[in-house]
């Protein structure tokens, strides 16, 4: 039996990189500043509580395999690029990637997780969806059809990403090992995983609390 700890996450500014400025403008227009700041404090608290929860699990870190949303699988001749990406994002303040660095320091093994091609395709669509595409090349006359089309394409890409991630975990998580994956809340990875991968949720499932299986929910930091 293989175990996978699945941690639903919300991406921070440091994770989003160049898209953050435009997303910040959208948030500022739609949400009062005090709510934005409260949301940021909540995200910081989440990552602090997550590290505390992991520390209390008494894991054998030498048998822990780490997977990360948006961390691409790279060819063998570029060995070490995954770790370089983690260090670069940690250096600019990503709480997610600072936690990855800590796990690696404890002896955990980092694995590239996603298809680079699918990530590039999604990034391009997200740019279009927030108005960053070349305005001289509209996808439709009034834009409404474009938005619907982009939404459908993003949903299809998310499914393809989940399938790729599940296959990657199946190939790299060995019997009796434990994996941990940090994954955006919109994903539905579980349905694509092999039957012998037992999923647990250190911070709860990415759904209504009333549906959480308390027997599978691991300790949460206070």
Image (cartoon, rainbow, N blue to C red):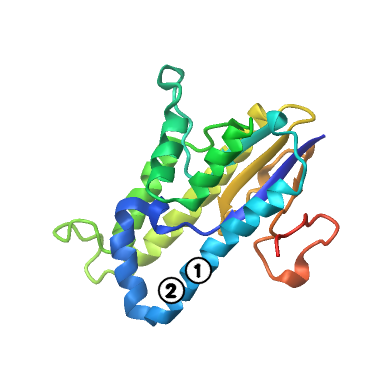
**Quarter of the figure with the C terminus:** bottom right
Image marks 2 and 1: residues in contact by CB distance under 8 Å: yes
**Quarter of the figure with the N terminus:** top right
Left or right of 28? Residue 135 is left
* Quarter of the rendering containing residue 164: top right
Left or right of 109? Residue 119 is left
Task: Count residues near mark 1 (Cα–Cα under 10 Å), then give few for <14, some for 14-19, many for 20+.
Answer: few
- Residue 57 vertical placement versus 179 (above, below): below
Picture coordinates of residue 205, whole percent (x, y): 69, 60
Residue 31 visible: no
Name which residue lies at 48% across and 39% down: 71
Pick whichever, 3 or 140, lies toward us.
3
User: Where is mark 2, residue-wise?
Assistant: 37
Task: Count residues near mark 2 (Cα–Cα under 10 Å), then give few for <14, some for 14-19, many for 20+.
Answer: few
- Residue 164 vertical placement versus 135 (above, below): above
Q: Using the image, tell me which numbered label, if any, was put on residue 165.
A: none
Left or right of 217? Residue 133 is left
SS for tag 1? Answer: helix
Name which residue lies at 29% across and 62% down: 21
Picture coordinates of residue 125, whole percent (x, y): 35, 53
- Residue 141 vertical placement versus 164 (above, below): below
Q: Using the image, tell me which numbered label, if any, was put on residue 41.
A: 1
Marks 2/1: CA distance?
A: 6 Å
Residue 84 visible: yes
Residue reaching furthest to the top: 77
Picture coordinates of residue 28, whole percent (x, y): 33, 76
Picture coordinates of residue 79, whole percent (x, y): 45, 21
- Residue 167 vertical placement versus 161 (above, below): above
* Quarter of the rendering containing residue 37: bottom left
Name which residue lies at 36% across and 56% down: 126
SS for tag 2? Answer: helix
């Amino acid at each position: 039996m293989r175990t996978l700890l699945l941690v639903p996450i919300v991406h921070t500014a440091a994770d989003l990189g160049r898209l953050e400025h435009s997303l910040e403008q959208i948030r500022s227009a739609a949400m009062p500043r005090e709510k934005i700041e409260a949301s940021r404090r909540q995200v910081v608290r989440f990552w602090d509580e997550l590290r505390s929860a992991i520390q209390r699990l008494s894991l054998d870190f030498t048998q822990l395999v780490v997977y990360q949303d948006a961390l691409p699988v790279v060819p063998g001749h570029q060995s070490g690029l995954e770790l370089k990406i983690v260090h670069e994002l940690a250096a600019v303040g990503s709480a997610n990637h600072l936690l990855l660095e800590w796990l690696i320091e404890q002896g955990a093994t980092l694995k590239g997780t996603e298809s680079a091609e699918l990530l590039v395709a999604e990034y391009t669509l997200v740019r279009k969806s927030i108005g960053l595409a070349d305005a001289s090349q509209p996808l439709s006359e009034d834009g409404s059809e474009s938005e619907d089309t982009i939404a459908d394409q993003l949903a299809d890409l998310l499914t393809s990403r989940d399938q790729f991630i599940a296959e990657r975990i199946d190939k790299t998580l060995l019997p009796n090992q434990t994996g941990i994956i940090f994954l955006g809340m919109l994903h539905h990875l579980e349905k694509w995983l092999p039957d012998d991968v037992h999923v647990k949720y250190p911070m709860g499932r990415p759904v209504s609390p009333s549906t959480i299986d308390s027997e599978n929910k691991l300790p949460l930091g206070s």
